[in-house]
Structure formats: structure tokens, C-alpha cells
Image: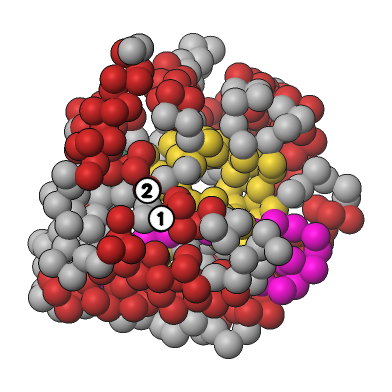
Amino acid sequence: MTLDRRNFIKGALAVTMLPQPAHAGADDALPLKTRAARRGIVFGTAVRRSALEKDPDYARAVIRDCAILVPEVEMKWGVIERTRGVRDYAAADWLVTFAAKHGLALRGHTAAWHGNLPPWAKDALRGPDGKAIFDHHVRDLIGHFAGKLSDWDVVNEAIFPGNRLPGGFGNTILYQQFGRSYVIDPFFIARQADPKALLFYNDAKLYYDDSDHAARRRHVLALLEWLKAGEAPLDGLGIQGHLDAGGPKISPDYRAFLKDVAGLGLKITVTELDVNDRLLGPDAAQRDRAVADHAKEFLDITLDERAVGGVLTWGWSDRYTWLNGAHKWARTDGLRNRALPLDEQNRRKPLWHAIAAALDGAPDRRT
Ligand code: G3I
């Protein structure tokens, strides 16, 4: 027996020994990836190399339920090229090997984003070679993984209606320096660098019933239309899905938005699902219920649109959620967020069951 096979069997045995919730029924044995596949949907999560390496219990839980992974930070420019000219793919390559070893697909995230830029790039992008430096980053990044990734979030978060620029574009360094070309050019570069990967535009805040989300829906749709009109090799829209339990309601216009996107011939993937509980009181059981109910409502509507072919959560265990960082999205009462399908002990929470129910109830895309 090979070492890989022994590890697989050891992993499979350990998985069956994971703690189960008191109300677990027979069907709870079915992993989320299997439920999703039965509907023609791919299910997965964002991961970090450091957590997968140091926490085998978490790694097993990820492998058990997920068919696709996306690196939470390892493919961002600030990680790849911390020092100008020294491109370090070690952490991302580790994830490529991990995914291949466990038979999982891998999504790239993200090539063109104003966030997580290396500090040196802020001056360099403003210099005379700025666009060449930017294009080179996109080409080298996507080319490095050519043939190994199934999808790419090529461009991330270009729309910020609050900045009041034409087209709803964010007033970011990339837009200031290169205008709209920073959104369209990366798709052409990406297709050339990796002809097989599906190429997505990825953005946030597209589903709630408030003026910001409504403006974003309008601007993102116009952006997708513009990309299509420019014959950009665009395959789909990534809807991030950073939900807020106890916040605004889902917009009655969200279904029509999904339909409009599908009408452009695009695929849709929920790319960064988590449910922030910062607006809820301290009671953990109540938070877990509200988080699960809100995700179920969002997923039921979203998965009803057959163009939605994938769901990825933005993390798998509360132990590692980005929402516990020091930023404005964190809870203000000092409690840790319970935003993800597993708790800090890697035990399933009601959110896991809500996702299972939403996947089970989704229309079958295969027929
Ligand atoms: O790895 C360094 C570590 O060496 C250093 O000591 C430490 C000091 O702050 O920073 C560590 O890097 C952090 C990194 O996460 C890894 O944990 C960065 O500071 C921190 O800014 C970074 O945050 C990530 C953020 O994107 C920026 O890249 C979050 O984990 C990640 O969840 C978040 O993900 C974004 C998506 O890409 C796009 N959509 C929104 C989503 C949430 O903000």
C-alpha cells in the first residue's frame, strides 16, 4: 500500500470519528460536496496553508466536505511578490499539491485587485512602467498555475458606487492609473496565459435591499455587459456572499439580477460565503440559528437560478475566520464570530445543516 493510500484511509477513518451534533440523522453522513454534486453544483471553501498544515482535524474536515478550494491569501500579489522582482510561489504551490493529492479542484484568487498589494507596488504602479508591471503580474501569476486551476477570480471588487465615479468604479490606485483597462485587459491576458481555466469577475454586496447593493447590482451588470461587448473572455460572475445576520433583507430584485447575469450567457458562483454575526447578541445558540436561517434564505434564492454552478464558503472553521481580525467588520463585544459551518472545535454548526438543506433543495442542473 502506498503512503498516500495509507494516509487516505487513516484520514477517512478519522473523519467518521469527527464529533456529530446530537440531532444528526442518517443523511448527515453525506458530505456537502456529494449533495452538491447530486445537483450539478461544485462545493468548496477558502483555505490557508498554515491552518491545513498545523491542524489535521481541520484539514480532514475540509477534505471531507469540499470538492474545490480557493486560497484565502496565498495567491495575492502582496504575498507572491513581497519584495520587488522576487516572486515566491511556495505557499500557493503547496496548496496546488495539497489539492491534487486529495483530488480537489483549485480556484485562483485573485489577479487584479487593489487590496493586498505589496507596499513597493504603490509607487511602481504610479511610475511610467506602471501598466507593464501590472500586466506582467497578471500574466506571470496566471501562467504559473496554467493547467492546474479550474477557475480564476481574475478581477476583484472594481465597483464602489459610494466613490461616485462614472460606471460606479472604485477610486482605487488601479482605476486611477489605468482606468477601465485594468478591468478588461486582465481577462485577455488570463485567457492567453491559461486557456483552460474559467475566468470570473468577482464582487461583493449584490443581494440586499438597500441603495448600496442596488447600485452595485446595476453597475456590475453594466460592467459585465461592457466586458461582453468588448469580447473579453469572461466566463462568469463571482458573487462573494459576505452576509450579515440580523442586517438588511434580501432584495426582491436579487432574483432578477441573477437572471440578467445568466441571460448574458455567464456562469455564476458564490465565491466567499460567510455570515457575520456582529449585529446579534451574545447568545451562541441564537446566533447559530440566525446565521443558519439567513444563509438558507440566501442560498435558496441563489441556487434557484440554474446558472449558479458553485458555492464556496470563505473559510471552514470559526477557528480561522477572517472576521475575528482587527477591523470594522469584527464584533465589538470581544466575542468571537461564529460565521462558518464548523465551530472553533471543528464541530458542525446549524450553518452546516442549512447549507446541506439548501443544496438538497436546489434544482438539478444536470437534467
Ligand atoms: O501573513 C501575514 C503575517 O506574516 C503577518 O505577521 C500578519 C501581520 O498583520 O499579516 C499576515 O497577513 C495577513 C493575511 O490576511 C494572512 O492572515 C494580512 O495582514 C491580512 O490583511 C490578510 O487579510 C486577508 C484580506 O483578504 C487581505 O488579503 C484576509 O485574511 C482575507 O480573508 C481577505 O479576503 C477578502 C477577499 O480576498 C476578497 N473579498 C473580501 C475578503 C474579506 O476581506
**Side of 66 where 123 appears, left or right:** right
Question: Marks 1 and 2: in contact by CB < 8 Å?
Answer: yes
Q: Is residue 282 above or below residue 113?
A: below
Q: In the image, residue 19 lies at what x, y percent? A: 14, 52
Q: Mark 1 belongs to which amino acid?
A: Leu
* Magenta part of the chain: 258-277
Image region (quadrant) for ligand 1: top left
Give the label on residue 32, or none.
Answer: 1
| Other-residue count near label 1 (Cα within 10 Å), few / some / many at <14 / 14–19 / ≥20 | many
Check disc 2 and report the residue beneath it: 65
Q: Which element carries disc 2, helix, strand or loop?
A: helix
In the picture, the quarter occupied by the C terminus is bottom right
Q: Mark 2 belongs to which amino acid?
A: Asp
Q: Quadrant of residue 186?
A: top right
| Other-residue count near label 2 (Cα within 10 Å), few / some / many at <14 / 14–19 / ≥20 | many
Q: Nearer the viewer, residue 340 or 360?
A: 360
Residue plotted at (42% across, 16% down)? 90
**Side of 226 where 215 appears, left or right:** left
